[in-house]
Image (spheres, rainbow, N blue to C red):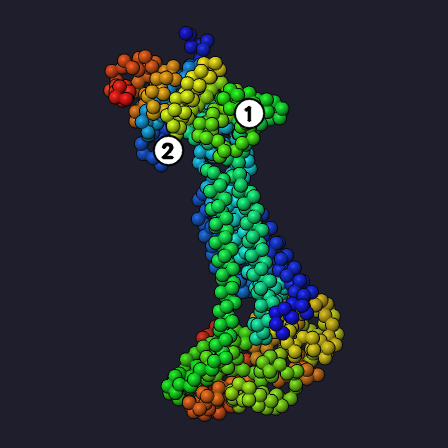
Amino acid sequence: MPAMNNPPVVQFRNVSYAPPGARAPIIADLNLEIQRGETLVLLGESGCGKTTSLRLINRLLVPTAGEVLVEGKATSVWDEIELRRRTGYVIQEAGLFPHFTVARNVGLVPTLASWAEVRVRARVDELLKLVGLEPAQFAARYPRELSGGQRQRVGVARALAADPPLLLLDEPFGALDPLTRAALQKEFAALRTRLGKTCVFVTHDVREALLLASRIALMQAGHIVLLATPAEFARSAEPLARAYMATLQMG
Amino acid sequence: MNLFEFTAHNWRELLTLAGEHLRLVAEAMLLAVVIALPLGVLLTRRKFLQRPVLGLASILQTVPSLALFGFLIPLPFGGIGARSAVIALVLYALLPVLRNTVTGIEGVDRNVREAAVAMGMTGRQILWQVELPLAASVILAGVRVATVISVGVATIAAAIGAGGLGTYIFRGLRQNDDTLILAGAVPAALMALAADWLIGRLETTVGANTGPRTAHTQDTRAQLRRRIVGATLALVVIGGLVAFAAWRGTRQRATGAQTNAPVVVGSKDFTESVILAELLAQTLEAQGVAVARQFELGGNLCHDALVAGRIDVYPEYTGTAFTAILKHQPVTDPRAVYDQVSREYGEGFAVALSPPLGFRNDFAILVRGTEARRLQLHTISEAVPHARSWRAGFGQDFMSRADGYPGFARAYDLKLAAAPREMDLSLTYRALAAGEVDIIAGNSTDGLIAALDLTQLADDRQYFPPYEAVYLVRRATRARAPAVQSVLQRLADAISTDEMRRLNYEVDGRHRTVADVVRAWRQSKGL
């Protein structure tokens, strides 16, 4: 595919990031291209730099060297508010606003973008149905009145609200019990195929990575040590990838 | 008169004072929130400012309120009255509101804040839609604590002419009247509890949906905290009253004489009284008598302590004993006053009077020296025509006692531009010198009269009763320590009014210690 016709949605160019005052960078000289419509999974242990990489994309962080391009434009050039409103973001334990109802949580970004109230309400209903929550039953509830799985569904609905082309997910299912997690993973896979979003998905769960990824970026100590499709990943001779695969066989 | 009778007779005045009190607190809290809330938000945005700003607010809270008032009087935005009181209350209220604003905002769940940023909310939207609503119950808790503190501190506002329930408390302390003290303290305590309860309810309402985890645990925690604060406050108030009552009770049980115990010399809480007490103490020590000092007792605590046997001797004025303790109408003949006080103290309290010390400390009507020279004023009568355009500032004592303002105004047919401001005596001198008021009632021996260039107007109609200085001594003390009697005889007629003024000035104006001033004076007199 010629790059001119289909430029990458996200592009890391020689990116390093070190927090203020830190000696060693968390990620160093990272290069990565994420194509439209794919789900790129950043896989690695805690502290390998996968979440930091994710936060560089919607400019929660700014690179200390190199640049991150979104839609061909450096994040440092983007208006940060505009960039974030067109980038869905889902985090562990959802990060829902405890003082907002489910409907207000989901409708937040459209409301910020000054959609008409009727349109926001219709969109909220549509999204709640999409993530499997009956609007009549759930719209008026507060987050504390939901189960962990339900909260996470609301978190996904909120991220999708303004129909952003790019979705960032930081271990969204990490805090859920195994059965709920498996159900949500399956639903997410179907949803993603249907909506055709570009997704960047952070996890330390190799099973989840193999299930959801178009490509897996395996990270270690701030570097990508392997970039491969799930099938290639399973066959790779890279030692860390083999170690991950070994945990599957043991299970 | 008990508290209920007093309330029934004075409910109109009580309501006025309570209204003044409430208004002081409400104005101060409004201002404090308007200042501290934005400032607190700023501190969460500029963290390096937190330590210095919160530190400064903490220091402000430790400044004694009377010192703060004294500092505010000469300032252009201060002066006497409600304005300075409100400023002082605001300064005290800043810290709790400021600290809780910072704590509340910084306590917002990190995940929630990060989600808000990542959703593309602007800084302003995050503040108004996320941080402030989620911090509201914590901020309100700060407002509640500050309000309860303000209700308490506002009682001291009476010292600066701002009125409020403190007027009763101060008056009660000076007149040795428990009913008056309670008439001020009980409504103030009730007001504090009511504020605590009302704002606490608001907190629960606001906090109901904002619990970071589950609102249920948050509610009970907030309620528990509130109950603890409320209960602590109530305990402190009740404890204070009980301790006070208990202390009053002890004066009924006069302590038995102990021959080898030291002679306890007491004094009231103003310079002259301390000087006279120190003079007696040093002279006794020179005779080899063991002395213990119990100085600076407020109000009429000296009298209570003397009757209870907690102190053996203290300096007093015949006029004060005559009117404030024995509750007689003022009489102008010094001899008659001395004799009657001597007789009634002997019969009623088993307390004897020393011979007069030689000077009088009468009420002195004072004006600025520049004004007196310009208008050629020497007597009070000469000043009366000018007084129509004057403002007056009088101590609580002068305002309320039988030989004070009401009779004085009648005797001279005095009409002022406005009702006199009631404030702390020591502050009236500075208010006069600063031009805040034009006429005050001070003490004729006060060192500040010369120091601030004030002029005393002569009492040409002889309204004021005589205040001859004497020592009051328990008869039991005289019996077990005969040296006391001979020392009191030697101090008879020892000090002139001029000398007393100079001694006061050495301490108040030159800031020398009382002990040094007294020692030097005793040497010069060969005592």
Tell me the kind of residue under disc 2: Pro
Task: Decide: few, some or many residues near mark 2? Use Cα within 10 Å; few <14, some 14-19, many ≥20.
Answer: some
Q: Position of residue B434 (x, y in %)?
A: 61, 66
SS category of the residue bearing label 2: loop
Quadrant of image for the C terminus of chain B: bottom left
Residue B21 in sight in this render: yes
Q: Quadrant of residue B356?
A: bottom right
The quadrant where residue A187 appears: top left
* Rendering coords of residue B282 (x, y %): 42, 83
Against B522, residue B453 (above or below) is above
The amino acid type, in three-letter code, at marker 1 is: Pro
Check disc 1 and report its element: helix, strand or loop.
Answer: helix
Q: Is residue B35 visible?
A: no
Marker disc for residue B110? none
The quarter in which the N terminus of chain B is drawn is bottom right
Look at 49% across and 21% down and name the residue there. A131
Q: Give whichever of B413, B495 is nearer the camera.
A: B413
Earlier-in-chain disc, 2 versus 1: 2
Q: Residue at x 65, y 78 (%)?
A: B402
Please determine if labels 2 and 1 lie on a single subunit. Answer: yes
Label disc, if present, on residue A19 of the rendered structure: 2
Q: Residue at x 44, y 44 (%)?
A: B48
Residue B510 position in % (x across, y down): 49, 73
What label sits on residue A135 in the rendered view?
1
Q: How many labels, in total? A: 2
